[in-house]
Amino acid sequence: MKVSYMLKQIDHVQLAAPEGCEDEARKFYAGIFGFEEMEKPPVLKKRGGAWFKFGSVQLHIGVEELFVPAKKAHPAFEVDNLEALKDHLENNGIQVTEDDHLPGASRFYVNDPFGNRLEFLEWK
């Protein structure tokens, strides 16, 4: 199939959260991970949630009225010095679930404050 377009990259990942999640999202994503909070466009602010970025990647937390956390679907973040991140998270009271089933990588999972699954990995 010949196409006249080209997909360039993922612009952002959005995770859902319950109404009133903004302060907890800020504590977790900006406070613990060090993501920079982004100003949402005025027309989207009234929907709630919060936007964050690190490097060229954006993570949007969107409010979902009938929120159910993503237990299987997840973003995966590639990390330099995964062990240091693991120590940092555990020192902040975040439970880490290690997984050694991906050949060539070390990885673990955590849940955000809303129960969404997040993967962190480092290629060997």
Image (tube, rainbow, N blue to C red):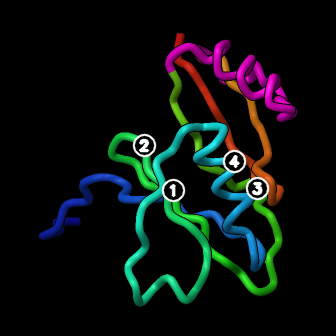
Amino acid type at mark 3? Asn
Amino acid type at mark 4? Phe
Residue 101 part of the magenta-drawn span: yes
Circle number at residue 59: 1
The answer to which of marks 4 and 2 sits earlier in the sequence is 4
- Residue 89 position, x and y percent, is 75, 28
Q: Secondary structure at mark 2?
A: strand
The stretch of residues the image draws in magenta is: 80-104
- Residue 108 position, x and y percent, is 73, 28
From the viewer's perspective, is 35 left or right of 101?
left
Amino acid type at mark 2? Phe
Label 1 near label 2: C-beta < 8 Å? Answer: yes
The answer to which of marks 4 and 3 sits earlier in the sequence is 4
Amino acid type at mark 1? Leu
The 10 Å Cα crowd at callout 4, few under 14, some 14 to 19, many 20 or more, is: some
Q: Which residue is at a point 48% across and 56% down the rendered structure image?
A: 37
The residue under label 3 is 116
Q: Secondary structure at mark 3?
A: loop
- Residue 96 position, x and y percent, is 82, 29
